[in-house]
Structures are given as C-alpha cells and as structure tokens.
Amino acid sequence: MKTQVAIIGAGPSGLLLGQLLHQAGIDTIIIERQTPDYVLSRIRAGVLEQGMVDLLREAGVHERMDKEGLVHDGFELAFDGRRERIDLHGLTGGKTVMIYGQTEVTRDLMAARQASGAKTLYGVTDAQLHELKGEKPHVTFTLNGESVRLDCDHIAGCDGFHGVSRQSIPQGVLKEFERVYPFGWLGVLADTPPVNEELIYANHERGFALCSMRSPTRTRYYVQVGSEEKVEDWSDERFWDELKSRLPADDAARLITGPSIEKSIAPLRSYVVEPMQYGHLFLVGDAAHIVPPTGAKGLNLAASDVSTLYRILLKVYREGRTDLLERYSTVCLKRVWKAERFSWWMTSMLHKFPGTDAFSQRMQQTELDYFVGSEAGRTTIAENYVGLPYEPIED
C-alpha cells in the first residue's frame, strides 16, 4: 500500500488535514484503531475560533455548521457578585466564535471523506512507524488479521496524547513541559434550553462553573471538582444544586434542569512537547500539546497545526519547497505557547486552588477587575478568545 501522506488518527484533526490535502490533489490514507461510532461518541469541545471556522469553510465542510452552529459575539465573566460581558465582535474588529460541537465537526468531515472516496482504515491494530529519518518512511499495522505495510512520503501524527506517533520518537529527542492542575471539570450534557444566550464563566468561592451549550435545546454545564472525585458520587440533583450555588442569583433562578444524557469528569493539565516533528513525522494537536479547557483552545490549536502542515505540504508538492518542512515545529509552537498562556491564565483566574486563602481570592478578583476595567484589558481577553492569527509559514 502506498500514499503521499499517511495520517495516524481519524479524529477531527486527521480528517480535516485529509480533507484539505484531498482537495489539493495530494493523496492520503488515514488509519484509526477505533471504530467510526467510537470516534463519534467522544463528547468534547464546542467553541470554534474564527480561524477554525474559516478553515472548515476552506475545506468545504461548512454547510451544516453555518446552518446549525450558533455565532456568538461575546461571553460573560461572573465574579465578585457581578457579571461583565466581553464584546468579542466589537473588540476584535468583527471576529466571533461558533458554538458547534466537536462531534458534529467530526461527523461532517467523515461524511465528506466518504463522499470523496479517499481511504480511511478503521479497526487498525499494532501500528508502528518506521524509518522516520530514513529514505523510506512507512507504517506497518494489522487490519482484519492481515499485516499491512503503508509506504509514504510523510506521516502526520493526529492520534492524540496516548497515540503511537509521539511514542515513536526516540527517548531524549523531545523536551516535555507539563503542569497538572489539582482539580477537574465535572461536565453534564442535558436536553434543556441554555440559561443564557452566551457562555458564562463563573469564579466563585465554592469553585469554578461554566454554562455552555451545543444548541438552543442542548446544554453543556461544568463545575470544578476535586481531582479525587468520582462521577458516580454525583447525582443529577447534586450537580444542579452545586451549579446553582456558583451562579449569580438571577441566572440560578432561570436555570432549567433535566436528566443528564452524559456525565463525566475531565482532569486539567497543560502539556507541550518540543519539537513537534522528527524526520518525516509531524505531530498534530493533542499528540503534541494539551491545554486546560478553560480557554476553549484544544480543538482550535489542533486546527491551526493542521493549517500550518497543510500549507507547508502544498508548497512541498507544488513548488518543491522541501526546506519549509523544517519550519513546521517552529511556526506551530509560536501559537501553541500563546494559547497555552491564555488557557493557563483563564484557569488561574477562575478556579479555586487548594489552600486558597482570603488574600489569594481577593487577588483573583482584583486581577479580573483590572482586566475588565479597561478597553485594553477587555481587548486582550477578546482577541485571545476568538483566536490569535495563524502564524505565517514564511516571515
């Protein structure tokens, strides 16, 4: 089996890269260890930056997103007994975010790939990457009980934090940067109308809370919980009561509750590896970096990696610019670290950390008050939230 670009992982980043390259006439084969239904069952992000929305439109997979997605011009910060709206549209020259679930993005990309006839192999096991710095990079794996060798020019590692791609890089090559936060997010998905037209991020003495949504009839709510907490200890009633206690009184009074259709606890961490490439292998998205979800940057960072790799490969295949391959990691990491900073800042400002005393609590509130108290501060928050510009491949 042979292709130009082998893509490891059929999540949204692998599928989006495959769609863009296919449109450009560059051959790809995607391999995925899970089934399509399993990939679609992952309940993940739902806030898309302006840059990712534009990239999905460029990839031609925007029709349902534009019809069903919710364009948001702003969001609210609740702290110290007050609510402050960040006017994304007004502060960034017209940029917005789109509320459209990662599951729906993946579904659209799967449909587009199937319609294109491009090859995706599901249920792959024992995948191994070979000759990453050699002249004949290739991937071996087992499919339906048979051993397969896939020869290629380049390999895109889009298989997440626990995937084989990053683990295929020899020890001592990568430098890891990590911060594990001492809490998680308990998230509930419910078929109830949102409590507010825009997202609410709440800093409260009992801990952080977030009111989000997937549609006008489906909501996604979160509360900060200790890292030792277990989902089975949280009944729906306990969750709703805790959420109400952390929201401003008028929002709590308006909150419509209902049975949860999904409930899970996600740990929070910041993680980056440098470099994001090794020979013919390019790490994309969660394979190279993780952000706490507070800044809504995980899926969006993966999209910016995809954009960078796609545009480099276009120049490689159309103009012979193989020299640009060496710039992938440098270009990506500039934006990655800025997104890591914003996610760290949002997490630090909105959560209650173990051992937080009255002074620390007041510092959080004062920091938030300082930023929302001037147009410059609000603009800083807004331009990071809608997404910083994609880094140019060539200066």
Image (tube, rainbow, N blue to C red):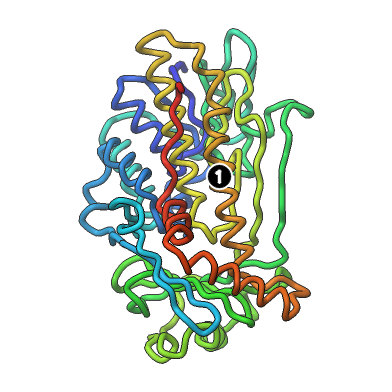
Secondary structure at badge 1 equals helix
Q: Nearer the viewer, residue 317 or 327?
A: 327
Q: Nearer the viewer, residue 208 or 59?
A: 208
**Which residue is found at the position 26% from the left and 36% from the top?**
115
Query: In the picture shown, does residue 22 fall above or below 45?
Result: above
Q: Amino acid at mark 1?
A: Lys
**Which residue is found at the position 54% from the left and 61% from the top?**
294
Percent across and percent down for residue 374 are 45, 64
Q: Nearer the viewer, residue 146 or 129?
A: 129
**Which residue is found at the position 47% from the left and 17% from the top?**
1
Query: In the picture shown, does residue 263 fall above or below 103?
Result: below
Q: Is residue 298 visible?
A: yes
Residue 148 is left or right of residue 69, and the answer is right
What residue does disc 1 label? 338
Q: Residues within 10 Å of mark 1 (few under 14, many from 20)?
A: some
Q: Is residue 189 visible?
A: no
Percent across and percent down for residue 51 are 37, 43
